[in-house]
Image (tube, rainbow, N blue to C red):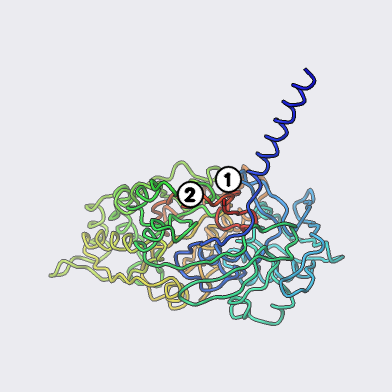
């Protein structure tokens, strides 16, 4: 019996060793990671653009990360406390961390990064608006002091949202033009090696990464493929390993998902809270009239838009607060309704009758390329039915950013401004009059200015009582809806496609916007 037990025990131990060996992450390999549109910068210190958020966290880290339940986890900060009044946040920082150029990481870098985010980041200007100081009593302690509570602050510290950059690289420079934007030096698991414009970025394993043994990959090759059909072909032929989005046309999605070597994942988009909106340029004379804006809203059939353009991958989202922020959604907000008769009547009442050729006035439409050309074509056809001819201009991503946020020559623009992890950083930037800043991407490009809305947004940003804060957001949604400040359309469903050999690609609410320190390729 003793011999039988020993033999059984030996087999069990051998089995456990075999399982452990099988489950141990494989080391080495190259990950071919698709970023659909080429980023304009590789560091998200002053950008919230999707391509930048895909790349930046691999090189440049944040204080915290978040699991799939939004629970904060250590990154550059190992511990943190918040004072009872919500005005003091104390972070203990990780020791022994090095920048990729060999310099020591310290609290001074954190303090300087918070300053840059407050001054230059499209959402950080709101997120860190109440920061009065960042004290650094020693190299491993950063104390953020606020003049008013910021109840969302602990969820705003991911690398994709609030990166920590090196003070010695940024001090005394413009973060929008600093050379680090195109050749970043960070603390992350991967080191920047090459950016071949129009083709790819190469990131290589950081041999001195603070998390010993990681990353597992030798290299990440970030590829840019603007053409959607070409992306589908690349997945079919095995040229790509991983991409978020969905990265292929929704018309192809079911077919690509069915490929035997391809898996798909819909988690990992909660931190962004994907949304699609139609924004007005309030400097366009016709669009100053609410009746015109309401007519445009009535001309768009949201169900048809969801079915035809999005192939059902998403939800109709008529409020600025989307479905990922359930606690803040005002249940009283419903779509304006598809009603061509009402739309035509409103335009007549506004003093824009049809001319002899059947048109009233023309508008220029832009579209963020992440929405796809099809969404712009849909809106163009919809407005033609009420006598508004649309000059739809579709650009690559970098050109769109410049034209929409610097040139501002649009009358309407189809945007993809996400709700993020909280409505204050995600939504305030769009409608807050103080966030109208020429050249600042994903800000208040509409030039919307409503004192009541400003008051509600500013009150919600500092209200620490959850019920009172929720009510402020409910009221905000009512005001925005009644004013037809924008037409909120669809909350697209995020879908990640991956080779089934790629493991640990979605471990938290940021999905493929994470560092990839844990990603490995099965041999």
Q: Disc 2 marks which residue?
A: 322
Mark number for residue 494? none
Q: Position of residue 136 (x, y in %)?
A: 83, 66
Query: Which residue is found at the position 80% from the left and 20% from the top?
Result: 2
Q: Camera-side residue: 120 or 256?
A: 256
Residue furthest out toward the front = 3
Q: Quadrant of residue 486?
A: bottom left
Relative to 356, 491 lies left or right: right
Q: Camera-side residue: 293 or 413?
A: 413
Q: Position of residue 93 (x, y in %)?
A: 79, 60
Quarter of the image with the N terminus in it: top right
Q: Residues within 10 Å of mark 1 (few under 14, many from 20)?
A: some
Instruction: Look at discs 1 and 2 and give the one toward the viewer.
Output: 2
Residue 18, placed above or below residue 220: above
Q: Quadrant of residue 140?
A: bottom right
Q: Residues within 10 Å of mark 2 (few under 14, many from 20)?
A: many
Secondary structure, mark 2, is loop
Q: Camera-side residue: 8 or 189?
A: 8
Query: Which residue is found at the position 60% from the left and 75% from the top?
Result: 181
Relative to 344, 411 lies left or right: right
Query: Which residue is found at the position 67% from the left and 82% from the top?
Result: 173
Q: Position of residue 19 (x, y in %)?
A: 65, 39
Q: Disc 1 marks which residue?
A: 470
Q: Are marks 1 and 2 in contact (CB under 8 Å)?
A: no
First along the sequence among labels 1 and 2: 2
Q: Position of residue 52 (x, y in %)?
A: 54, 67
Q: Does residue 337 appear anywhere in the picture?
A: no
Secondary structure, mark 1, is helix
Q: Does residue 45 appear anywhere in the picture?
A: yes
């Amino acid at each position: 019996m003793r011999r039988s037990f020993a033999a059984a025990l030996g087999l069990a131990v051998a089995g456990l060793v075999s399982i452990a060996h099988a489950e141990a992450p494989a080391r080495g390999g190259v990950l071919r990671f698709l970023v659909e549109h080429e980023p304009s910068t590789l560091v998200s210190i002053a950008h919230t653009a999707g391509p930048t958020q895909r790349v930046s966290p691999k090189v440049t880290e944040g204080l915290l990360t978040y699991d799939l339940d939004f629970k904060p986890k250590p990154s550059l900060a190992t511990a943190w406390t918040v004072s009872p009044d919500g005005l003091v946040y104390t972070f203990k920082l990780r020791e022994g961390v090095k920048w990729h150029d060999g310099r020591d990481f310290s609290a001074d870098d954190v303090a300087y990064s918070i300053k840059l985010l407050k001054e230059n980041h499209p959402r950080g200007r709101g997120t860190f608006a109440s920061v009065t100081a960042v004290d650094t009593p020693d190299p491993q302690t950063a104390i953020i002091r606020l003049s008013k509570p910021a109840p969302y602050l602990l969820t705003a510290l991911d690398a994709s949202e609030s990166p920590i950059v090196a003070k010695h690289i940024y001090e005394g420079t413009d973060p929008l033009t600093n050379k680090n934007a195109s050749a970043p030096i960070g603390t992350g698991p991967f080191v920047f090696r090459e950016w071949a414009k129009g083709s790819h970025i190469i990131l290589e394993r950081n041999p001195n990464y603070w998390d010993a043994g990681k990353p597992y990959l030798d290299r990440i090759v970030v590829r840019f493929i603007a053409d959607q059909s070409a992306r589908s072909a690349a997945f079919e032929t095995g040229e790509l390993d991983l991409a978020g989005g969905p990265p292929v046309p929704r018309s192809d999605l079911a077919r690509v998902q069915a490929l035997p070597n391809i898996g798909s994942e819909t988690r990992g988009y909660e931190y962004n809270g994907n949304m699609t909106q139609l924004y007005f340029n309030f400097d366009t004379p016709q669009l100053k009239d609410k009746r015109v804006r309401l007519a445009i809203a009535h001309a768009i059939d949201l169900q048809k838009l969801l079915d035809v353009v999005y192939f059902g991958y998403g939800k109709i989202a008529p409020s600025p607060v989307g479905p990922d922020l359930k606690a803040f959604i005002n249940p009283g907000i419903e779509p304006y309704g598809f009603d061509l008769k009402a739309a035509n009547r409103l335009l007549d009442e506004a003093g824009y009758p049809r001319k002899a050729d059947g048109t009233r006035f023309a508008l220029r439409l832009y579209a963020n390329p992440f929405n796809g050309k099809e969404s712009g074509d849909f809106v163009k056809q919809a407005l033609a039915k009420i006598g508004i001819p649309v000059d739809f201009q579709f650009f690559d991503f970098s050109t769109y950013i410049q034209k929409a946020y610097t040139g501002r020559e649009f009358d309407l623009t189809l945007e993809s401004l996400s709700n993020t992890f909280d409505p204050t950083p995600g939504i305030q930037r769009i409608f807050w009059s103080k966030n109208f800043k020429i050249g600042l991407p994903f800000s208040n490009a509409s030039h919307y200015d409503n004192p009541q809305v400003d008051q509600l947004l500013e009150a919600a940003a500092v209200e620490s009582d959850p019920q009172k804060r929720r009510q402020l957001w409910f009221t905000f949604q009512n005001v925005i809806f009644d004013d037809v400040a924008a037409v909120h359309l669809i909350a697209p469903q995020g879908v990640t496609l991956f080779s089934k050999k790629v493991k640990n690609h979605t471990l938290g609410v940021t999905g493929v916007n994470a560092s990839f320190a844990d990603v490995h390729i099965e041999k």
